[in-house]
Amino acid sequence: MADYHDRSRTAGGPSPVKEQRGGEGHAERPPRVCFARSGVVGVIKPPGLPTQAPPGNDSLAHWLRSQHGDGGYLGVPHRLDRAVSGVMLFAVTPRAARQLSRQFERRQIEKTYLALTELSDSSQSGGSHVSAPGPWSEWIDWVAKIPNHPRGRITEAGDPAGRQAETRVRQIGTIVAADGSLVAMLQLEPRTGRMHQLRLQAAARAMPIVGDGIYGARCNPKQSSAVDAIALHAWRIAFTDPDTRHRVVLEAPLPETWPSACRDVLAAAACSHLTGTESSPHE
């Protein structure tokens, strides 16, 4: 295991994974390890790269195996969609895999996403960002997978194929996109892990995630220049270290393809939290 930890420090270097290039010549950074301890590995995933794939195809799992030698144990307790960027967890020991899986099952792992979504209400104020985050709300829906298609749908509570999807969400700002349109910046905390949950729930509220043509968004390459990318980012994940039992919080920087104003919005939201001026997350 010591050898793996040594390699993880240079995981941002040469990689067998191809760079993800967009129509404007932008190259997304390759994956990189951001945490390696107690059999748990945190990895920053670029958009356009699947979590897992058949042998011979690029994937995040294949890249990680190459970092500590093919043939070693690798557990995948959760996944991110190919088009989604951000931080995720792997396990390199069976014990760590069991611990993480148990935490996911008991909803003890906290995930926070950031998203840019289209706004159908053109009357909303413009500018680089709003002055303060909005109130927290709950999105509760029933979702079902469409048979033989890699997508889902919102359904009724009585549908036998449906499963309840729960997400805590707030709007933390508005951004003027490259094409002049206004988009919302959301903070989302899913309590369940359904297929395309956040994408479906946002689209059902006439706020499709920027670039997500599958669920009704306009596909404008100026919004996100990476191949197969949508503006959904797994920003933060919190879990309990299997050995120390300490709480660990990992965070992934915003994608470089997102407007620079997003960083101002995020900083303002963090400031409102520290000063106690944000809306109460009372449920």
Image: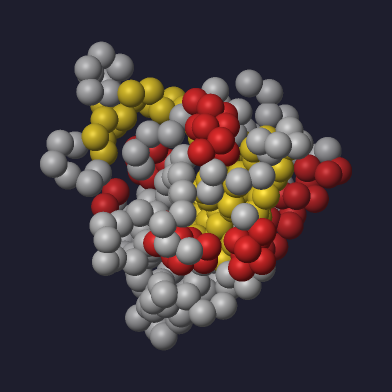
At horizontal 63% and vertical 21% (from top left) the residue drawn is 283
Percent from the top left, x then y, of residue 78? 45, 42
At horizontal 65% and vertical 40% (from top left) the residue drawn is 238
Which quarter of the figure is the N terminus placed in? bottom right
Residue 43 in sight here = yes
Q: Nearer the viewer, residue 185 or 240?
A: 240
* Residue farthest toward the top in the current orientation of the protein: 158
* Residue farthest toward the left in the current orientation of the protein: 148
Say above or below: 174 vs 257: above
Say left or right for 148 vs 73. left
At horizontal 30% and vertical 57% (from top left) the residue drawn is 53
Q: Quadrant of residue 244?
A: top right
Say left or right for 173 vs 212. right
* Residue farthest toward the bottom in the current orientation of the protein: 25
At horizontal 42% and vertical 75% (from top left) the residue drawn is 16
Percent from the top left, x then y, of residue 39? 61, 46
Identify the coloring: secondary structure
Residue 172 in sight here = no
Percent from the top left, x then y, of residue 65? 45, 60
Q: Nearer the viewer, residue 184 or 146?
A: 146
Q: Quadrant of residue 7?
A: bottom right
Say above or below: 235 vs 278: below
Percent from the top left, x then y, of residue 254? 59, 62
